[in-house]
Amino acid sequence: MDSDGRRGIVSYGAYLPFHRLDRAAIRASLGQGGGTGTRTVAAYDEDSTSMGVEAARRALWGAPLPESLYFATTAPAYADKTNATAIHAALGGSREGFATDLGAAVRGASGALRAAAATGGMAVLSDIRTGRPGSADETAGGDGAVAFAFGTGERVLAEIVAQASVSAEFLDRWRVPGEPYSRVWEERFGTQAYLPLINDAVTRALKSAQLEAPTHVIVSSPQARAARAALGAFPKPSRADALEQEVGFAGAAHAGLVLADVLDRAAPGDTVLLVVAADGADATVLRVTDAITRRPTGDGVRDQLAVSREVSYPDFLTWRGFLDREPPRRPDPERPAGPPAARSQRWKYAFEGSRCLSCSTVNVPPQRVCVHCGAVDRAEPVPLAATRATVATFTIDKLAFSLAPPVVDVVIDFDGGGRYGCQLADADPAAVAIGDRVEMTFRRFHTAGGVHNYFWKARPVRKEH
């Protein structure tokens, strides 16, 4: 441990998808479900892995990727294959790094956070929540991701002061592998089961921290009634906004998203009680340090909530696989092959181009032979994932295969050199124009033969810095 004894969060980042579903649209379509407010919706080309990449990119703050990465989600893109390795590759991690998944349950978030804290690694929490059409899970769910990097010393902006846990086995929520939605026992049973566990963990954590009144209290649980009851035991000013009205419950990512929202506004000396109640209860006490002033501004949880586009309920059902609509009259995409993807990992996942050492031309994709001067094997890698670009020209394709037609294809010029043609995500086709500023985003192009084809798209810059 560092000489000053601090251990905790050194940086963090959150990602909320651009699309929102107005809950009233559910009742308007089905005559049941719905409610007030909105829920976040991962786009048709997003999943827990791609959103995890976006959150982790925000959490790095220009620093290198920690040597260990722990990924938690209840909606893994793959089973029998590690999903964290794709996140690690997209972040440009070295082969010497360690990346692993932690289960397919909400409590995996606590495991990822503890493992990352113990090893000075990164915890990536990402989830897509769904349920039967018209169900409470569909209405109350939300999609999003968050990442926390841990370390020691003066870099720590939220120090871990105390932790306490309790585990219990009872049947409250479950999903058989392969099913698209969870099953839930009667809500009163879950409340009665969880409240004593939460009280136990909270009491021991606060006692260990010698703290009576935390500045901020976060209680996150798939059992919403139990979470509200536990939070209600604390004074109203200390109760953190659970983001239920704008985001919904984001599963394994939820507690982290609320914590990121709290840290976005926290002041040095503030204390945070973080409780995750899932198959038990985990309570953590954090103390915000002077280093919190290092946090970036302009891309926090509230900033992302302020920019969005509404998605229709039929489109939402289509993206989630509950509504099988007529596809475009085009052949289905072919299954991506493993060997070519492995050979071009730095390009496909980390999005690196090459700069010619003879004439300084940036080649995208990377080339052995420079497209400008013809120099052979005289190039250095150029990371482009974080480089912004300008739209040089574009076309709108209404016949290409897509779950959200039409497809917008753009040719972009990167700041500092390099031209590339790619798809444009999260854009209004009617509003695209030459000269638009864009940034890169990691997406799932399609799935064919059970293989996800991940690559990079451009998306409009929401806020120029």
Image (tube, rainbow, N blue to C red):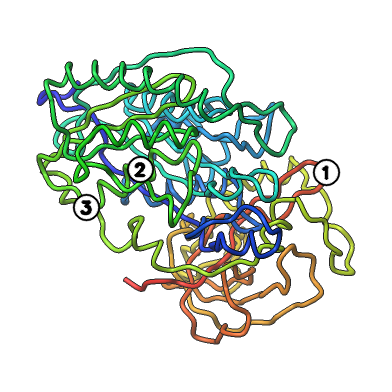
Q: Mark 1 to mark 2: distance in Å?
A: 35 Å
Q: Residue 422 vs residue 8: left or right? A: right
The reply to whether dot 1 and dot 2 touch (C-beta < 8 Å) is no
Image location of residue 253, percent across then percent down: 46, 40
Labels 3, 2: front one: 3
Helix, strand or loop for disc 3: helix
Amino acid type, residue under disc 2 in the picture: Pro
Amino acid type, residue under disc 1 in the picture: Gly
Query: Could you tell me which residue is drawn at 21 percent across and 32 percent down?
Result: 286
Image location of residue 79, percent across then percent down: 68, 30
Labels 1, 2: front one: 1
Amino acid type, residue under disc 3 in the picture: Arg
Which residue position holds label 2?
Answer: 64
User: Dot 1: within a 10 Å radius of its alpha carbon, few (fewer than 14), some, or many (20 or more) residues?
Assistant: few
Which residue position holds label 1?
Answer: 449
Which residue position holds label 3?
Answer: 265
Q: Mark 1 to mark 3: distance in Å?
A: 45 Å
The quadrant of the picture occupied by the N terminus is top left
Q: Which is nearer the N-term, disc 3 or disc 2?
A: 2
The reply to whether dot 3 and dot 2 touch (C-beta < 8 Å) is no
Query: Could you tell me which residue is drawn at 56 percent across and 84 percent down?
Result: 431
